[in-house]
Amino acid sequence: MDASVVIVGAGPAGLILAGELRLAGVDVTVLERLEQRTGESRGIGFTIRTMEVFDQRGVLRRLGSIETVTAGHFGGLPLDLGVLGAAHGAARTVPQSVTEQALEGWARELGADIRRGQEVQALEDTGDGVTVTVARGDSQETLRARYLVGCDGGRSTVRKLAGFDFPGTDATTEMLLADVRGVELEPRMSGQQIGNGFLMVAKLPGGIHRLIVGERGIAPRRRTGPPPFSEVADVWKRLTGSDISHAEPLWVSAFGDAARQVTEYRRGRVLLAGDAAHVHLPAGGQGMNTSIQDSYNLGWKLASVLAGHAPEELLDTYHSERHEVGRRLLANTRAQSQLILGGEEAQPLREVLSELLQYPEIVRHLAAKASGLDIRYDVGGGTNPLLGRRLPHLPLTAGARTTSTTELLRAGRGVLLDLDDNAKLRDRAAPWRNRVDIMTVTADPEHVPPGGTTAVLVRPDGYVAWAAPGSHQDLVTSLTRWFGPAT
């Protein structure tokens, strides 16, 4: 084998996956069609959950100073994300080019082999591995890997070559996007209904503004390249009456409201993550964030199978967990599409939802959905409120050392937190010490886990697999399910 895992695509999903696999010691090769990073801003923000993910792996500090906010929106209707009480806010103005640079540096330092200018032309799942034919210029190369993961975007070559079904709906409208310099505009982070269309403005670092504009009733065009900036300026003038044609365009693009999702995230030894598995209107910036979290879910599972700790069936939980997340993502972005792109016929819907947002429990529900904090995986029944949910940031003391739930996940391993100094609990978990860090800790009195929790088994992706009291499964069963048989 040339590598245990070949990843196709060096965007955020591919780079996070490469880093996760290298944390576990898996040899990985990343193939990227482009010779250089584009430098385009593309996705410009992180949800609260992605901020937590980056912090849990120590990547957050690589991004430098980040301005966070507690103001969000759902379909253009304002949301207070502060009601979630999370340790992080959402980041709204970090260009994707900065994100990719930080993630690539992290993955390379961990030993990932990232090869640019490599275009996948064919692949074959042979049952015991995958053969990939790669073109570089006029030459071809064949690579063999035990698994192949397509992180190559909405037009995924891997998805097409491997024959994944990709049902859904085509785009019915089109939005134009431009990053411009040399013009001062009022920020409209949640967007604004105006005239016969919609616009959004975000202020990025370096005096750059991100503009998104769209007119209702305009069918998407068949394009072979990005639209000219004059087209963006014309729409802007029709909607606002102001002229921005003198601005300097740095990047111009167009996107639609197509909504598609593959029927399976895994076919044998070929898997998909990120936009290769799901495309949708990028409402609230959820696309890149969901893609990152796809890879965060997959990485430790694939590493465990490759190490021989867990059976291959563990990979089936990648599909069952993340396909449902993707399905709900498409549902909420399609709902937001009606609010954002709908005309007068959608105004009653906006008014009713605005009324509902006066209720705190509804604000919390939609804020959690927009922030990636509403996810609850099926880890077995029980009454403990932490089961299946992400473990929030909690300050802890381990002996004389201060630490936190975030810091304890930096190594990308499972963690068993013993909050009750229970020697029998630690003895039962001892056969899994090569995969799970067993920690006796004390919680900060002001940040105790809910439900009178005395012990928590946390997966490497930060989700709670077992908790006491309240889990219907016992600890050994949960350890075996998520980390393989005892050794």
Image (tube, rainbow, N blue to C red):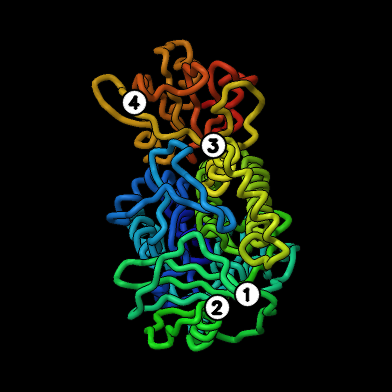
**Residue denoted by label 4:** 396
Viewer-side residue, 437 vs 97: 97
CA distance for labels 2 and 1: 7 Å
Residue 422 vertical placement versus 86 (above, below): above
Give SS at disc 1: loop
Q: Residue at x 46, y 61 (%)?
A: 189
**Residue denoted by label 3:** 309
CA distance for labels 1 and 4: 53 Å
Q: Give the amino acid at mark 2.
A: Leu
Give how far across and how far down residue 209 sits, in percent. Answer: 39, 72
**Which label belongs to residue 458?**
none
Give SS at disc 2: helix
Q: Which residue is drawn at 53% across and 65% down?
A: 192
**Which label belongs to residue 196?**
1
Mark 1 or mark 4: which is in front? Answer: 1
Give how far across and how far down residue 442 sits, in percent. Answer: 35, 19
Give SS at disc 3: loop
Residue 480 vertical placement versus 52 (above, below): above
Q: Give the amino acid at mark 4.
A: Leu
Q: Which of marks 2 and 4 is nearer the N terminus?
A: 2
Give residue 207's quadrant in the image. bottom left
**Residue denoted by label 2:** 239
Query: Mark 4 touching mark 3, by CB under 8 A?
Result: no
CA distance for labels 2 and 4: 53 Å
Q: Residue at x 44, y 41 (%)?
A: 82
Q: Which of marks 4 and 3 is nearer the N terminus?
A: 3
